[in-house]
Amino acid sequence: MTKARLLRLSVVLVSIFMILLIIVYWDNVGTAHFYLHTSFSRPHSPGITAGEDWEALPDVDEFLAKLLSSSLKQNSSTPRKTEQLLVQGSSKPVASNLEENVRGYDWSTHNDRNSLDQEQVQIERQRTLKEFCANSSFTFPTKERSFDDIPNYELNHLIVDDRHGIIYCYVPKVACTNWKRVMIVLSESLLDQGIPYRNPLDIPREHVHNTSTHLTFNKFWRRYGKFSRHLMKIKLKKYTKFLFVRDPFVRLISAFRSKFELENEEFYRRFAIPMLKLYSNHTNLPASVSEAFGAGLKVSFSDFIQYLLDPRTEKMAPFNEHWRQVYRLCHPCQIDYDFIGKLETLDEDAAYLLQLLKVDRLLRFPPSYRNRTASSWEDNWFAKIPLVWRQQLYKLYEADFVLFGYPKPENLLKD
């Protein structure tokens, strides 16, 4: 009897050991990097350091957390060879990519806004977000669900950097290409001839948006099975989480310009052809975008707005990420973000964030495009859009306006 019990106990212990070994040394990345490289002081729990603030975690999470925390001390003394390597040649990125050369970057010097208290700005942005997330009278779809209620496929915009303890939720048309480049450099997830990229602008655009380049939350289930949600929660509690947002209507204009005013084969076939048929009564459309553009067949901004407002659109498929609402991409009422950046203050916010993350010595954020879509364009773009459509469009994106402190565009919503 005693031997049988010992055998069962041995099997259980070996199984637990193997599971823990897999978790700790996952994919040769190691969750041993669970410590923060940052000096972030979170408003809700000041001075969080590795191994602290685990009280709210369930039993399984606490078990994993304690195990993983035991390896933090040995990693805090990890050699900084990589960081020293990255510092070299990081003063001014070179726009080697053809598209970047065509677009052009604004290398002009931006004065530090010394009068702007960046810390206070962050406090105010987070206060606004928390206030409306907690306001029961302000409702929008998915607001009341918990993090556990979010399907894995809806977590595909949360990029994880285990090396520096960072989670970035990317929002298309909000400088996400360059922030993805920054995450690639920091996480060393992409190599050039066996060497990690050091300069964000050296990374080819086609690699930046390749989903295999980034570790995102939606991939956790395939890698870690039933432990995936527990690991996500630990990372969300310990890592620094940030996102960048933009005036919702300006983001829509930018998406339209990028995907329908330029030749884009994928978006022509998936979206432009149905729009032209439904809202412009075109038939027998060309098979390729180049032929369509040559014949003067282009989606109008009015067609695009009708498509967004058409109830049939999302019955077929969810909005494409380029015009999907930020609250649906990043779940700001379920995830407690430490930093909220805005495209309107991109240069200042990016510099401040990199400084807070203590990675400003490793790289600088790539400069802004000169031809960035501006909020001052709204009146012209919406001039021919019927008032009732503008009002309906605002309701569709109202949560993004309110949660992130963008004023209601009264001039567009009244006669």
Image (cartoon, rainbow, N blue to C red):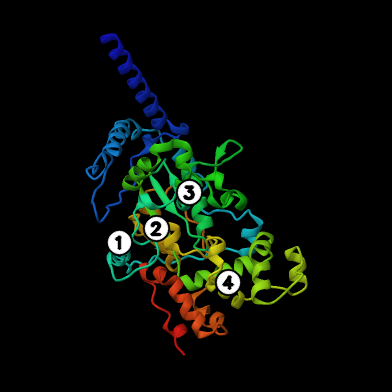
Pick the quarter of the image with the N terminus: top left
Asked whether residue 29 appears in the rendered view, the answer is yes
Q: Which label's residue is closer to the chain start, 4 or 1?
A: 1
- The numbered disc on residue 331 is 2
Q: Are marks 2 and 3 in contact (CB under 8 Å)?
A: no
Image coordinates of residue 310 in percent, x first then y, are 55, 72
54 sits to left or right of 389: left
Q: Are marks 2 and 1 in contact (CB under 8 Å)?
A: no
**Which residue is disc 3 drawn over?**
183
- The numbered disc on residue 307 is 4
Which residue occupies 58% across, 71% down?
A: 307
Image coordinates of residue 248 in percent, x first then y, are 46, 70
- Distance, label 3 to label 4, CA atoms, is 33 Å
Helix, strand or loop at label 3? It is helix
Neighbour tally class for label 1: few under 14, some 14-19, many 20 plus, Cα within 10 Å:
few
Q: Amino acid at mark 4?
A: Tyr
Q: Amino acid at mark 2?
A: His
Which residue occupies 57% across, 75% down?
A: 306
- Distance, label 2 to label 1, CA atoms, is 23 Å
Q: Which label's residue is closer to the chain start, 1 or 3?
A: 1
**Which residue is disc 1 drawn over?**
119
Which residue occupies 49% across, 80% down?
A: 390
